Image: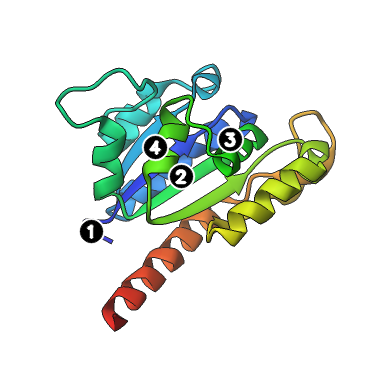
């Protein structure tokens, strides 16, 4: 998958630490990974972790522009896939509603290629009608989902809301990009 660029959004779920493993696995497969973190995610895991693993600057601020073209537009033009793992209910709601109030949601609205969301949240949040409606809206727009799975949640209960296994997310990314390559070659 050399030359495939992935933008990874990391949101403020306790599962944010698992995104480091995801970046590591993607780099080993020769993907170019750029991480965009929310402020909530930065309270759970350091941006330095992602800088070290991805070897790319980590974006968390809309206002750090190095040249005339906004960074989120540059990334959108070069990336093959946008992945949000873990994906919170907050991000899904903003994305479904078209709200762009931080670096991650602004990037999401500028990205015109394929998108994969890996939800991770409490079972009650996942089952809430608003979250389910947002999922439906996003699926109708062509967004891919993986999970959430049933597992041990941060609050100590077992339920649906656990982020999918990182190896499964990596496999899903490979399948989406493979399908993208096949579809492009048939055009």
- Nearer to me, 158 or 137: 137
Give the mark, 4 or 3, whose residue is nearer the N terminus.
3
Q: What percent of the width, then of the height, locates residue 32?
A: 27, 47
Quarter of image, res 57: top left
Eye-nearest disc, 2 or 4: 4
Residue annotated with mark 3: 94
- Residue drawn where x is 60% and y is 61% of the image: 140
Give the mark, 1 or 3, whose residue is nearer the N terminus.
1
135 w.r.t. 126: above or below: below
Residue annotated with mark 2: 22
**Going by the image, does 85 lie left or right of 152?**
left
- Mark 4 to mark 3 CA distance (whole Å): 12 Å
Image quarter of the N terminus: bottom left
Residue annotated with mark 4: 107
Q: Are marks 4 and 3 in contact (CB under 8 Å)?
A: no
- Mark 1 to mark 4 CA distance (whole Å): 23 Å
- Mark 1 to mark 2 CA distance (whole Å): 17 Å
- Dot 3: within a 10 Å radius of its alpha carbon, few (fewer than 14), some, or many (20 or more) residues? some
- Residue drawn where x is 37% and y is 30% of the image: 50
Dot 1: element: loop
- Dot 2: within a 10 Å radius of its alpha carbon, few (fewer than 14), some, or many (20 or more) residues? some
């Amino acid at each position: 998958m050399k030359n495939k660029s992935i933008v990874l959004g990391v949101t403020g779920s306790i599962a944010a630490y698992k995104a480091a493993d995801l970046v590591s696995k993607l780099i080993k497969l020769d993907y170019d990974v750029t991480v965009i973190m929310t402020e909530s995610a930065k309270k759970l895991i350091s941006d330095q972790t992602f800088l070290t693993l991805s070897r790319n600057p980590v974006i968390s601020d809309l206002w750090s522009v190095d040249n005339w073209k906004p960074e989120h537009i540059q990334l959108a033009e070069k990336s093959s896939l946008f992945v949000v793992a873990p994906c919170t209910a907050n991000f899904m709601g903003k994305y479904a509603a078209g709200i762009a109030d931080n670096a991650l949601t602004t990037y999401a609205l500028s990205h015109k290629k394929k998108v994969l969301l890996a939800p991770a949240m409490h079972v009650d949040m996942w089952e809430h009608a608003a979250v389910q409606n947002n999922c439906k809206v996003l699926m109708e727009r062509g967004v891919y989902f993986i999970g959430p799975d049933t597992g041990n949640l941060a609050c100590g209960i077992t339920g649906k809301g656990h982020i999918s296994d990182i190896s499964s997310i990596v496999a899903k990314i490979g399948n989406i990009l493979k399908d993208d390559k096949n579809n492009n070659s048939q055009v």
